[in-house]
Image (tube, rainbow, N blue to C red):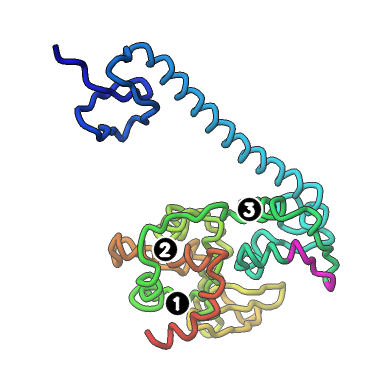
Amino acid sequence: MHSKPDSIATAGRIHYHRSGNYRTCSETMPLLRINKRTNPSAVVPIAIALACLLTIATAVILGQDSGSQIEAKASFGSICASCHGLDARGGERGPDIASRPEVVHKTDAELTEILQSGKTASGMPAFSFLGPAKISALVAYLRTLQGRGSAASLPGNPTQGKMLFFGKANCGECHMVGGQGGFFARDLSVFAARLSAEEVRNKIFNPDKDLDPRRGMVAVVLADSSTISGVVRNEDNFSLQLQTPDGAFHLLNKSYIRSQTYAGKSAMPSNYGATLTAAELNDIVSYLLRTSAPQKRSEAENNSEDHDDN
């Protein structure tokens, strides 16, 4: 008579083996060893029970994480919101800490130090009495308000994206990142801080979506029939300040303006889908996401040296 080989009970399954090495399965977890005299069917309930205990333990841990997030939100509401607002975008006594570049670009360690030590010159007290765990939870909650609760995976190569931004794509002709580039269009240093990769890509593909026509390009025909096109920076009943794509500002007397026509579209090209490959677009998106990440503050400060080498 040949005896039945030893076996291993797993969560819901029994696997037999013929040597001293256990047969393993990536979908199951060994729970106990059964010798040849043990009836395998007798231990299946035990295996299932242990699996249930594991599930319960996991749920408890996740519940603790959720509880700490709720506690951090409550702490922010009772301690920070009175000055900075519930959304961290500023109040009567405190500045915006959700979108200001100088705050968004700080590392978690720097924010922790500010909470622990305070900024007495600015009227902010120290909160060291909260303890390291609660301060860390507050910093994590602030990151969610900044839209950077967790590091998003990058769809491309940010280093290549930077080269494209200031090279082939010509984004740097109009936009500035980290103090480098043009100033005809908006500064993109923290542009992607609250956006996903897909949202950044969509804004590149369709720059005219949801655009206020009064913020787009305008063509001004002067009394001598010459035309100037650009973006309105300031306007009152008597004058118009226009910035042209070369960066120059033109202060025009309205009595000298024959017509003023808004194009209803952005000055940004809308054909990047044709001039750049999908991989190149992903690289540019990754560069904008990386420069907007709080932990990458030093990258913006060193951009000038890097650009000189390109």
**Which mark is first along the chain, 2 or 1?**
1
What residue do we see at 35% from left, 71% from top? 160
Can see residue 21?
yes
SS for callout 3: helix
**What residue span does the magenta drawing correspond to?**
114-121
> Looking at numbered disc 2 in the image, what kind of residue is underneath it?
Ser
SS for callout 2: helix
SS for callout 1: helix
Residue 39: x and y, percent?
Answer: 32, 12
Can see residue 181?
no
Residue 284: x and y, percent?
Answer: 39, 66
- For this rendering, which residue is in front, 272 or 308? 308
Residue matched to label 2: 286
- For this rendering, which residue is in front, 231 or 175? 175
Residue 189: x and y, percent?
Answer: 54, 70
Q: Residue 172: which disc?
A: 1
Q: As drawn, is 29 to the left or to the right of 93?
A: left
Q: Quadrant of the C terminus?
A: bottom left
Residue 206: x and y, percent?
Answer: 42, 57
Query: Which is the main secondary structure of the residues drawn in magenta?
Result: helix
Residue 93 covered by magenta stretch: no
Q: Nearer the viewer, mark 3 or mark 2?
A: 3
